[in-house]
Amino acid sequence: MDIDLEELTAENLTPHVIKVSTENVKNERLIELVTGLIQHLHDYVKQVQLKPAEWDAAIQYLTQVGHDSSTDRQEMILLSDVLGVSALVDTINSAQAKVNSATESSVLGPFHSEDTHTLTNGQSIGSPGVIGELMLIHGTVRSVGGFPIEGVAVDVWETNGNGFYDMQDPRRDGPNCRGIFQTDSRGRYYLVGVKSVNYDIPIDGSVGLLLNILKRNITRPAHVHFQLKHPLYLNLTTALYASDSEHITSDLVFGVKKSLVKSFQWNNNPAALINEFHLQEALQKMRWDGKGLWVLHHECVLLEK
Amino acid sequence: MDIDLEELTAENLTPHVIKVSTENVKNERLIELVTGLIQHLHDYVKQVQLKPAEWDAAIQYLTQVGHDSSTDRQEMILLSDVLGVSALVDTINSAQAKVNSATESSVLGPFHSEDTHTLTNGQSIGSPGVIGELMLIHGTVRSVGGFPIEGVAVDVWETNGNGFYDMQDPRRDGPNCRGIFQTDSRGRYYLVGVKSVNYDIPIDGSVGLLLNILKRNITRPAHVHFQLKHPLYLNLTTALYASDSEHITSDLVFGVKKSLVKSFQWNNNPAALINEFHLQEALQKMRWDGKGLWVLHHECVLLEK
């Protein structure tokens, strides 16, 4: 054929695709993101000399990850988590916190949900009949300068004592083991939850298949998730990890940071705490056995916007 | 805390994730694929300093690409196609064909379907009432040494004349504009199709959204897809492109190769061809207007396994 058609080769294809994909784009950041994406995808394919059958398997796999995701389940986040991408995004964006001695962030994970409820300090995030030992979770939210911050929305979520988030429970009839609190005039939040347990991530989906093929650990160390929001401060997504978990050094989503590892304390004479934090009603509702409480205490520091 | 926990940083996270992901794997190729994938994903995140909101958008986007895919639609392949990944995989795996003067390959595309039918030479891949001008598609399949190969399964698919594949037609009641033929004892395949047209890829899904944001061309040059299989020869996925298409140099999936560009010829006195290829019955069934036929002729050469 006598047409002016440049033959595409492994060498000239990548700059050609980048040119075609960015030549009409004005947004500099979009150009940067698209250029880097195409460059790295192509570099990967060339480096490993990807075979058509391997490409096909990757396409089928990523499609299935999408299919596994629904309003109740986010398998693509889980995939990003186990490949360390979530932890890396978190790490490179949280350097500022460490420098300023603010609370460090951690991965969001796939189990955050907008389907939660607003509670008041002293209430329990667990439904009556929740499995597990009860735990007081409390602390103060402060600025870097040390001043307590009132009106911080503290979104808390965790598994119940059997290691499942509420969205994994087919009998779920509302939020359980999650809730949003507001810090009071002294910057305090306090609530009743259950003592966190180690748990296996769901392995009945695509990510479970991958972890099985790679013979990787599937257990996360016990932890409680937090997301803190206030109009004048940077949002913080973090978690607190139980120091006595045997998986503290082998977290499959790489979320543990030293500053976020906490000793979950057993208190067998919690009368003063119950009084201070007005827990009587919540404990009665949760059918507390009166034998003591676990306590997770964390002072939290937010960066100003 | 007094635990032996190495702080994860942007520097040590990547080798750590690679170690955890490969230390229990025996298969060398799997180790290579997983190592490269994690390295390039992380390199990309670090290079562009990916923001949490951008990560979130990417997660939502890839999830939606999965949701857009069904038995009738493969949006993840389309995404790979428009990012040039499919063409690159094809290019690096088809070098052997070029060296040996065998027929070059091209991208599979998202519209190949197992829901096709087996036809005999001389039949039409179009249903009666198909839109478009009729076209004889024929050729001989040979070895590199020039010997005709009998019994090659020639899987052909194309859009009908309105630019849609059968799977895009909600009224579809069976395969249309696709079928599988066997080469005869002289290595020949011959069939009636419709003259290929330029067509827009579906833009009502995630890939359409991306192309719109990037202000990219959404039209593919006119072409016919082929997949050839024979037990003694390497499978070949290829396509033939119409030389007169104004999109021949701007294919949005980068599938065009010079050797695959063909002149689709108009023959206004096809009596001899009709006789040679026994097209009488097919043309009658297709309500041929008797005014002439388009002809696409291609000699195909397969590599031995």
Image (spheres, coloured by chain):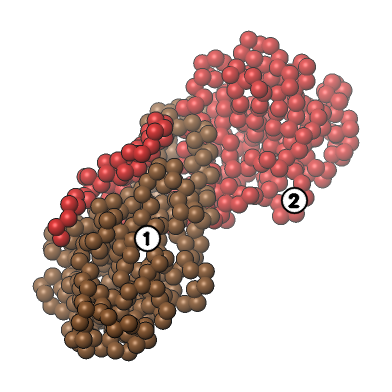
Chain colours: A red, B brown
Dot 2: element: loop
In the foreground, A289 or B38: B38
For residue B76, side relative to residue B256 (left or right): right
Name the mark on residue A172: 2
Q: Is residue B305 visible?
A: no
Depicted A191 relative to depicted A166: above or below = above
Q: Position of residue A75 (x, y in %)?
A: 55, 49
Dot 1: element: strand
Q: Find the distance from the CA under tag 2 to the CA under tag 1.
A: 48 Å
Q: Determine the image quadrant of residue A31.
A: top left
Residue at 25% x, 74% y: name it. Answer: B294
In the foreground, B102 or A212: B102
Give the amino acid at mark 2: Arg
Binning the other alpha carbons within 10 Å of mark 1 as few (below 14), some (14 to 19) or many (20 upward) gives: many
Q: Is residue A226 visible?
A: yes
Residue at 45% x, 32% y: name it. Answer: B50
Give the amino acid at mark 1: Tyr
Q: Chain of mark 1?
A: B
Name the mark on residue B199: 1
Q: Chain of mark 2?
A: A
Depicted B173 relative to depicted A144: above or below = below
